[in-house]
Image (cartoon, helix red, strand yellow):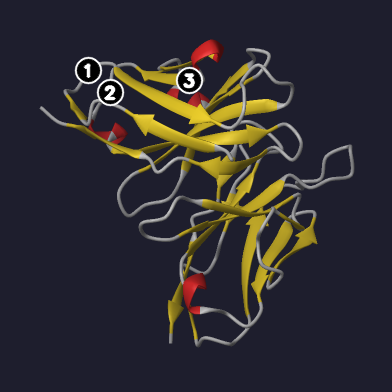
């Protein structure tokens, strides 16, 4: 059974770096075809894909966030990470991680999300 | 980037009815492998987001057969037959043909 759970700071100040962790079970990020994606959703609004990391270390980032995103993984501890630099109030959202399959390229299991507020 | 348009922000229907939710892409989502990289998701309050359909028409494990994905090229539809009370939720389409992957704006299914 695949499960994922996001964790983060809850609140942080503008210009700071947001660090998020996705802890998962039921699959390994060293297994062929497995990946983890990050998606965010401002309150009451739609979904925005941010980044994906694959079993082989390949990463894809949403260019709309320019070079502010870094996604990484710790295979031995079943974790994936997302860093967003220079945050501002527009980064306030619920952040989700999702298991992603190479076969189908879809997000088949999602975490419950972690809410992040950027405020001074 | 590829834009996905879900024209209907809300749809009002009664339980037991059939409903169709449409998603239009700004370019074809057909890849050279013959598959469409379009998937559908359900969001309900207090629940994790659920994947319903991938490759435009393939139901994910455990999804009831009343959920039907169809379409090709740039036009896709999620149909729900005999809508159940637990189906009142927000539905999103997603394209993963080209990065950046993009979601539709969502369609909320509401009880009439």
Which is more N-terminal, label 1 or label 3? Answer: 1
Q: Residue A22: horizontal and vertical position, in percent?
A: 43, 27
Asked whether, in this view, residue A64 is left or right of residue A15, the answer is right
In which quadrant will I find the N terminus of chain A? top right
Residue B79 versus residue B32 in the image, above or below: below
Q: CA distance from mark 3 to mark 1?
A: 25 Å
Label 2 element class: loop
Q: Which disc number belongs to residue A118?
A: none
Camera-side mark, 3 or 1: 3
Q: Chain of mark 1?
A: A
Residue bearing mark 3? A79
Q: Which residue lies most toward the left here?
A: A120
Q: Chain of mark 3?
A: A
Decide: few, some or many residues near mark 1? Use Cα within 10 Å; few <14, some 14-19, many ≥20. some
Q: Is residue B51 above or below residue B102?
A: below
| Mark 1 lies on residue | A15
Q: Are marks 3 and 2 in contact (CB under 8 Å)?
A: no
Question: Which quadrant would residue A60 be assigned to in this image?
Answer: top right
Residue at position x 36%, y 56% from top?
Answer: B46
**Image check: B4 left or right of A46?**
right
Secondary element at tag 1: loop
Q: Are marks 1 and 2 in contact (CB under 8 Å)?
A: yes
Q: Which mark is residue A87?
A: 2
Left or right relative to A64: residue B51: right
Q: Is residue A73 visible?
A: no
Cα distance in 3D space between marks 1 and 2: 5 Å
- The residue at the point 74 percent across, 40 percent down is A104
| Sequence-earlier tag: 3 or 2 | 3
Image quarter in which the C terminus of chain A is found = top left
Task: Please give the name of the residue rendered at 24% of the width and 25% of the height, measured from the top-left corner.
Answer: A9
């Amino acid at each position: 059974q695949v499960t994922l759970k996001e964790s983060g700071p809850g609140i942080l100040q503008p210009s700071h770096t947001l660090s998020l962790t996705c802890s998962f079970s039921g699959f390994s990020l060293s297994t062929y075809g497995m990946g983890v994606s990050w998606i965010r959703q401002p309150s009451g609004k739609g979904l925005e894909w941010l980044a994906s990391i694959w079993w082989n270390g390949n990463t894809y980032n949403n260019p709309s966030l320019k070079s502010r995103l870094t996604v990484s993984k710790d295979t031995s501890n079943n974790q994936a990470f997302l860093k967003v630099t220079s945050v501002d109030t527009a980064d306030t959202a619920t952040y989700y991680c999702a298991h992603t399959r190479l076969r189908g390229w879809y997000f088949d299991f999602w975490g419950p999300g972690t809410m992040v507020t950027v405020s001074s | 980037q590829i834009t996905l348009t879900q024209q209907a922000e809300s749809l009002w229907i009664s339980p037991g009815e059939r409903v169709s939710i449409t998603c239009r892409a700004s370019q074809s989502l057909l890849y050279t492998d013959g598959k469409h990289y379009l998937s559908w998701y359900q969001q309900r309050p207090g629940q994790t987001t659920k994947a319903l359909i991938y490759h435009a028409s393939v139901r994910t494990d455990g999804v009831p057969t009343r959920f039907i994905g169809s379409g090709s090229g740039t036009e896709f539809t999620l149909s729900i037959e005999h809508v159940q009370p637990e189906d009142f939720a927000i539905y999103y389409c997603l394209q993963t043909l080209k990065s950046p992957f993009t979601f539709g704006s969502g369609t909320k299914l509401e009880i009439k």
